[in-house]
Amino acid sequence: MLEHAMKVVERIFERRIWQQIEIDDMQFGYMKVKETTNTILIVRAMQEKKLYFDFVDLEKAFERFPRRRRKTLISNRGLQALA
């Protein structure tokens, strides 16, 4: 019974979140309407027109950037850095 109640609560939260966020037209993956396979087809079609892409793993990019330096840059822009 608790499992079913949690699913209901989960869906309520999901609906509230979707009402609050805006998704860019270029966002793909993990969405019901825009799957990753659609993106692959688009990229292949563009490559045939001699356009090239570079994919950056932002998680790894931020892991390799020194935290103190990142914190300084963020605070210099008037933003609060997370731990």
Image (cartoon, helix red, strand yellow):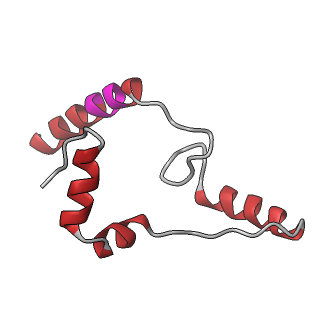
Q: Is residue 10 above or below residue 20?
A: below
Membership of 14 in magenta stretch: yes
Above or below, 80 against 57 in this view is above
- Which quadrant holds residue 48? bottom right
Count of numbered circles in the view: 0
Horizontal arrangement in the rendering, residue 39 relative to residue 20 (left or right): right
Task: Tell me the residue at 40%/23% (across/down).
Answer: 19
Which residue is most to the right? 49
- In the depicted structure, whether residue 16 falls above or below residue 76: above
Please state the horizontal and vertical placement of residue 6, each as a whole percent of the image. 17, 39
Task: Say whether residue 68 is left or right of residue 44.
Answer: left
Q: Is residue 54 above or below residue 26?
A: below
Q: Is residue 1 left or right of residue 57?
A: left
Q: Which of the 4 image quadrants contains residue 77?
A: top left
Q: Main secondary structure of the magenta part?
A: helix
Q: Quadrant of the C terminus?
A: bottom left
Q: Position of residue 28 (x, y in %)?
A: 57, 51
Q: Nearer the viewer, residue 7 or 26?
A: 26
Name the residue nearer the viewer: 64 or 23: 64
Whole-percent x, y for residue 27 in the image: 56, 47
6 vs 54, left or right, is left
Image point (10%, 41%), residue name: 2
The residues colored magenta run: 12-17
- Give the residue furthest to the front: 76
- Quarter in which the N terminus is drawn: top left
Question: Who's the residue at 28% across and 54% down the image?
Answer: 73
Q: Position of residue 70 (x, y in %)?
A: 26, 60
Q: Is residue 33 magenta?
A: no
**Quadrant position of residue 20:** top left
Q: Which residue is depicted at the point 62% across and 39% down?
A: 25
User: As rendered, which of 3 and 19 lies closer to the eye?
Assistant: 19
